[in-house]
């Protein structure tokens, strides 16, 4: 229940009200109905007002959720080991999509420097001016001697070589909501009644969306999501890649589990002040809106656009395969003040009850034939 969530400040409420008015005007201009994907896009990315484009702190203890890099440097340090392998097989360049606070870039670059394997360039594609500024400050303050290697992009480069990282990026891309009811496939959109956002189902007009939806066998009165935006991003990345790999980490499932008959209410989830709920109309602009990732769709889209499958496993297996346990071995258990926090962080990253099993890692590439260490055990490709 959203009534139990913490109350925002008057300034934050005014910010949300401003975004709501912008969305209402857009709904009115489009005949009092927009697809949910458009609502989600505006709520998250409307210039200066959306959740990711405004200035509120989102990551860490002060924000609305904690990502793996925020939780522990073990994540970035371990990921760096896999990046070295990919760069050696392709090109010494890294592109990170949506770098958040910049913590992952910081940890990766520090570890790569310690291992004598710095990339020639570390590019960050960041659409949020506020987050970009925070990332730039972090790199200048913590790694000033490496700042010249880090570049910020406004759009995907025409050519990509090396490794592309996406950690918890795909779950925040807009999704279409579909409702299977009375033998029909309907698209769930957003209308306004007395200045309030309400759900309204209509027949889909997007033929691509309808063609995808027809492939799923689900029971009646079933609600779920399809992300055309994710498919579009994977297509663009694969079309631009000459040699290298996509390394994508997020929470989600393969298609058969994603559209399981028992998952009848879909996966749409909102995050506000470290509490999860399912009402995307609650304080637009002040909360994150996410949906789980369909990893089968990612793999199929990549393969359709010239990439080949390199691996799919859980975050726990990926980190363990890549050597995360070695970092714990470097610290004496007698050093309780160092060992205990590190052990607790490792537990959260790898435990099935925490992030270890829900989060998956998928790799897709071009021109790379060697097996990747991160996928040496725990293969989950049968679930795609």
Image (cartoon, rainbow, N blue to C red):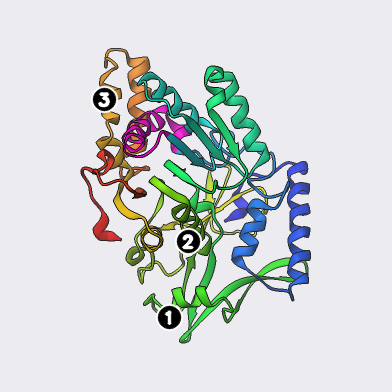
Which residue of the protein is positioned furthest toward the bottom in this rendering? Answer: 183
Residue 201 percent coordinates (x, y): 59, 77
Q: Viewer-nearest of labels 2 and 1?
A: 2
Residues under labels 1 and 3: Cα distance?
A: 50 Å
Residues under labels 2 and 1: Cα distance?
A: 26 Å
In the drawing, does residue 311 fall left or right of residue 76?
A: left
Q: Viewer-nearest of labels 1 and 3?
A: 3
Image quadrant in which you'd find residue 382: bottom left
Q: Which residue is mark 3?
A: 326
Q: Residue at x 63, y 58 (%)?
A: 41
In the drawing, does residue 338 fall left or right of residue 42?
A: left
Disc on the earlier residue, 1 or 3: 1
Q: Which residue is mark 2?
A: 231
In the picture, which quadrant includes the C terminus?
bottom left
Image quadrant in which you'd find residue 117: top left
Q: Name the one closer to the observer, 158 or 164.
A: 158
In the drawing, does residue 54 fall left or right of residue 217?
A: right
Q: Which mark is residue 140?
A: none
Residues under labels 2 and 3: Cα distance?
A: 36 Å
Q: Name the one closer to the observer, 316 or 134.
A: 134
Q: Which residue is mark 1?
A: 220
Q: Secondary structure at mark 1?
A: loop
Crowding at dot 1, Cα within 10 Å, few <14 / some 14-19 / many 20+, comes out as some
Q: Residue at x 46, y 56 (%)?
A: 239
Residue 129 percent coordinates (x, y): 67, 39
- Tell me if label 2 and label 3 are in contact, CB under 8 Å: no
- Tell me if label 1 and label 3 are in contact, CB under 8 Å: no
Residue 203 percent coordinates (x, y): 57, 82
Tell me which segment is drawn in magenta. Answer: 68-92
In the drawing, does residue 383 fall left or right of residue 298?
A: left
């Amino acid at each position: 229940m959203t009534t139990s969530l913490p109350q925002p400040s008057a300034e934050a409420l005014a910010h949300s009200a401003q975004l709501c008015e912008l969305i209402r005007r857009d709904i009115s201009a489009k005949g009092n109905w927009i697809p949910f994907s458009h609502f989600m896009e505006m709520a998250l990315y409307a210039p200066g007002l959306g959740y990711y484009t405004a200035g509120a702190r989102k990551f860490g203890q002060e924000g609305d959720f904690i990502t793996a890099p925020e939780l522990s440097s073990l994540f970035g340090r371990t990921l760096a080991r896999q990046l070295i392998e990919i760069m050696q097989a392709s090109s010494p360049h890294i592109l990170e999509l949506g770098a958040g606070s910049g913590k992952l870039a910081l940890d990766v670059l520090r570890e790569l420097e310690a291992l004598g394997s710095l990339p020639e360039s570390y590019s960050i594609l960041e659409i949020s001016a506020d987050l970009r500024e925070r990332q730039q400050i972090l790199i200048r303050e913590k790694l000033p001697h490496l700042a010249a290697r880090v570049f910020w992009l406004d759009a995907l480069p025409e050519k990509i070589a090396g490794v592309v990282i996406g950690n918890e990026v795909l779950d925040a891309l807009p999704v279409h909501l579909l409702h299977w009811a009375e033998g029909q496939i309907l698209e769930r959109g957003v209308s306004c009644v007395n200045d309030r956002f309400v759900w309204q189902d209509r027949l889909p007009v997007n033929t691509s969306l309808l063609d995808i939806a027809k492939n799923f066998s689900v029971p009646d009165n079933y609600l779920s999501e399809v992300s055309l935006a994710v498919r579009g991003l994977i297509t663009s990345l694969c079309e631009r890649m000459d040699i290298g790999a996509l390394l994508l980490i997020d929470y989600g499932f393969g298609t058969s589990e994603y559209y399981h008959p028992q998952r009848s209410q879909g996966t749409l989830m909102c995050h506000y002040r470290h509490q999860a709920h399912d009402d995307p109309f609650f304080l637009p602009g002040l909360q994150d809106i996410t949906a789980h990732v369909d990893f089968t769709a990612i793999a199929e889209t990549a393969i359709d656009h010239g990439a080949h499958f390199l691996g799919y496993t859980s975050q726990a297996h990926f980190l363990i395969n890549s050597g995360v346990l070695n970092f714990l071995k470097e610290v004496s258990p007698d050093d309780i003040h160092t060992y205990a926090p590190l052990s607790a962080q490792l537990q959260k990253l790898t435990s099935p009850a925490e992030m270890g099993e829900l989060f998956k890692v998928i790799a897709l590439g071009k021109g790379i034939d060697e097996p990747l260490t991160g996928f040496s055990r725990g293969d989950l490709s049968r679930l795609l």
